[in-house]
Each structure stands twice: as structure tokens, then as C-alpha cells.
Image (tube, rainbow, N blue to C red):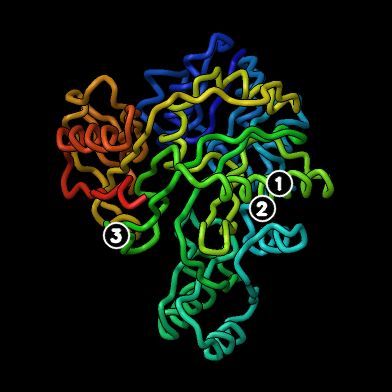
Amino acid sequence: MNVCVIGGGAREHALCVKIKESSHLGKLFTIGNNPAFKEISINFELNPNDFESVLKLCKENNIELVVVGPEEPLSKGIADYLLSNGIKVFGPKLKGAILESSKQVAKEFMYRNYIPTAEFKIFYDSTYAKEYIYGLNKFPVVIKADGLCAGKGVRICSNIDEAIKTVEDFMEKRVFGTSSMKIVIEEFIKGKECSVLCFVDGKRYLMLPLARDHKRLNDGDTGPNTGGMGAISPLNLSSEVMRQIEEDIVWRFMEAIIREKIDYRGVIYFGLMVGDDGPKVLEFNVRFGDPETQAIIPLIDEDVLKIFNEVASGNLSLTSIKIKKLNSVCVVLASKGYPENPIKGDEISGLDRVDKDVSVFFAGVSFKDEKYYTNGGRVLSVVTAQKTMEEARNKVYDNITRISFKDMHYRKDIGLNL
């Protein structure tokens, strides 16, 4: 079958590499500004939010399945549009996509469906938000902009001053535009983060290996929140925690979408915090996580295109998924100034010196005059899967020393302190 992948980041690069292994693939098309795509697909630099142009591309090239990487087209209804025109989509329709595009909707969905999450309050007015903060006697507290903010709309505030400034930034200065017209203020949960991704065909699910994202910019989980600075997979948790994740979170989610008639077809991402009182959901993503995908995809020992097509068709046939007995580490290389104001245009060198068992997935990269240059905040994801986590870490960091661009920034502690 002919397939189109939408999105121009490292996540989509990783998905394309895996899809290319499929015996079911005819031609692979991509929509995204990524120089890596020109080597592995027929690439078009269309606006993914221009649904008519996307449909025209699909019709002209006999594309049967569209795999949507980023959240924005899903939140605008691309799945609804393409499905109504006879194109299968791996990715939820609007009724499911809103679980990511609105923190308010997500929290209320969890509350009414008994999915464990942090205690929360929703505010539409900064005056009342500030009044609530002044009455708090427990910090830190978490403040979230309601809409899509590319993974940057969450702040952990250690005191009243930080919380008040966050409310002003989000609701008064509108640093995220209309996405921060409403905010959610919730309790801070201590624990370890965990990413749980599941294929969902509307009725059944398949859990992927657990992963851990590292969202803060600097070592030791310090600095501002980012879209993600690295990930590891699998994550080994106790049998009791795994039981709680599957029974209290995944099963209740599945029961909820069936009860609320949400025909969810794609991947659901549960961002969890595992603390002393068990796992709680911090957020939903309605698509593959980035950088978790880059760490998880190399571990899957299945034809992913077959799975994607069955999920999109609402007919998932597998009851379990084969996973390689390896440990994967992904480290993100970022530009100076990320996440606020990343510097672009610096030459990237050393990509030809990377070992064969190490993958480099492109994100913020451009190509000109036979050279690669930085073209965004998160530039590259460097990934390997080895027998042990220590071997994978050593291999990744050894290869990172061979890659360089001006003021290259990356965390040195991905995969430590698990």
C-alpha cells in the first residue's frame, strides 16, 4: 500500500525508517520539511493544516493510509476530514484529539472516568487564579496552559512569586497566545516519570514498552521544560505498579472511550508520575511522543505498517507485540537558546563518523550546498539499542562526541538514576 507520513521531526524520521522495513509498503510519501525524507520517501513540503491539499496529494498518488505525527493537524480535525473522503488515518478524530489539545477536557475526562490524576482547579480569569495562589500553603504547584504549547506550556512553581508570574505570563501576557486563555492549577506529585504508549483500534489496545522522557533542559532535571531532551526504553517497574497502570489507567481509558462513543484509532500516550500512592496521569498525548518514539521504535520486532493499517481499520489482530530484548537510549542534541530562542544556521559535522548500530534522526536540520545546518531547537536524536542500558548509554555518548555544531547542548544523564 502507498502510505503518507505527516510531520517533519525526528519522531517522523524514526517512524519512516521503521515503515520502510515493511513488506506491505508500496510507496512512502512524506509531508514535512526534513532533508532526511528526500533519501527515504517522496517528500512534499505542504502545510499539513491545508487539508484540501493533503487530500489532493492522497488522491493523486493512490495513498491508502495517512500516519499523522504531530498533534496540531489532529487537533484541527485532519482525521475527520480525510476519513470523510475515503482515506484511512492512523490518528484519532477530533473527539479523541481534544484530550491533548485541551488540558481542561483531559482533566475532566479523567475525573469522571475515575482515572487517577493530580487534584486540580481550572481558571478562566487571572484575578481568581492569583487569589487562589495567595491562599495556597503548599508548594511546589503545577500550572498548565490549557491548549497546545509544543510541550512548553507547563511550569512547576516553587513559591508564590513564581506562580503569580506564571499566571501573568500565561493569562495576561499570553505567551502561548489563545492556548493560555484558560489554565489548570494542580497539585505537584513527587515520583518518577513514565511514558506509556498503546496502540488503540477503538475496541482493543496493545501496550508498547514503557519509556521515560527527560523533559527539563539540563542535567539533574533542572532548567526549563522542553519538548524532551532524551528518552530510554524499556522501563522496568514492579509487577504491582504495572498492574495499577493496566487496570486503573489503560483499562479505564478503554472503558471510557467505548462508553463515551469516542472512536479512537491511533496511539494513546499516558504521561504518568509514579509516586508513593501509585501511578497518576499527568497528561494525554494523542500521538507518538517525541523523543520516546525514537527510543521505542527500534525495539519493536513487528511489521509496524501492518499494525498501523489494522489500527486505522479498527481491526487490530495481534494480542501481544514482539519486543527485542534490548535497551534503547535516545539523546537529543539541541541548539543554543533552546527552548526559548534557538539559534539556527550553524554547520553540523561528523554525521558520517557515526557507528552503523547508531541511528541519527533529523529534526531541526536543513541541507544546503551538500552540508547540513541547524534549523531549529531540537536538532538531532541520537539513538542505539544494546543488550544493557549501560552499553546503550556508553555507545550513544561515545558517538555524540563525533558530532558537532556550534554550542551544541545535550544532557549527560539520560538513563541514569532510573
How far apart are the alpha carbons under marks 2 and 3? 30 Å
Q: Amino acid at mark 3?
A: Gly
Q: Which residue is mark 3?
A: 220
Residue 297 drawn at (x, y percent): 46, 29
How far apart are the alpha carbons under marks 3 and 1? 34 Å
Up/down of 59 relative to 153, above or below: above
Q: Amino acid at mark 1?
A: Gly
Q: Is residue 46 visible?
A: yes
Up/down of 147 relative to 94, above or below: below
Q: Which residue is mark 2?
A: 99
For label 3, the SS is loop
- The residue positioned 54% from the left and 54% from the top of the image is 272
Up/down of 236 relative to 38, above or below: below
Does label 3 or label 1 sit earlier along the sequence?
1
- The residue positioned 26% from the left and 47% from the top of the image is 344
Q: Amino acid at mark 2?
A: Leu
- The residue positioned 50% from the left and 83% from the top of the image is 138
Label 2 with label 3: CB-CB less than 8 Å: no
Q: Which residue is mark 1?
A: 96
Up/down of 396 relative to 333, above or below: above
Side (left or right) of 84 relative to 70: right
